[in-house]
Image: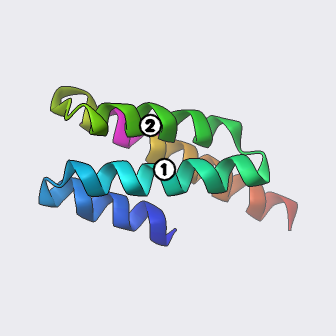
Amino acid sequence: EDDVEGLRAAREAGDTEQVARQAHKIKGAAKLVGALELAHAAAELELAAKAADWPQLLPLSADVQTAAERLRFHVQQEI
């Protein structure tokens, strides 16, 4: 959750390097727990951020947020 918040803050600050770093962290953590949808979304965002592809950053950030919410919902259902 903190990583997703950090991602939002970096995006709002216009810091593509920080967006890429946060997306990379999210990707790694998601892969570690088998959250492949989130890992894929974060990987796509990381690539866009490294390329400073602003037209793609907003929709890809939304994809990461959506995937994180789905994961959170799934985990809560399992508890």
Name the amino acid, label 2: Asp
Q: Determine which residue is flagged by label 2.
A: 63
Residue extending farthest bottom: 2
Query: In this picture, which residue range is highlighted in magenta?
Result: 58-63
Q: Is residue 21 above or below residue 55?
A: below
Residue ID at (76%, 60%) = 75
Residue mark closest to the camera, 1 vs 2: 1
* Residue type at the position of mark 1: His
Residue 3 in the image: state x and y as whole percent: 46, 65
Give the number of marks: 2
Which of the labelled discs sits on residue 24, or is there none?
1
Mark 1 or mark 2: whose residue is earlier in sequence = 1
Residue at image point 31% right, 52% down:
19
The residue closer to the viewer here, 76 or 39, is 39
Q: Is residue 44 left or right of residue 36?
A: left
Q: Please report contact status of discs 1 and 2: CB closer than 8 Å, yes or no.
A: no
Quadrant where the C terminus is found in the figure: bottom right
In the drawing, does residue 44 fall left or right of residue 50? right
Residue at 23% of width from left, 53% of height from top?
11
Height in image: 56 above or below 24?
above
Decide whether the magenta segment is chiefly helix, strand or loop: helix
Task: From the top left corner, tell me how far across and down residue 39 is, in percent.
Answer: 60, 41
Where disc 1 sits, the SS reads helix
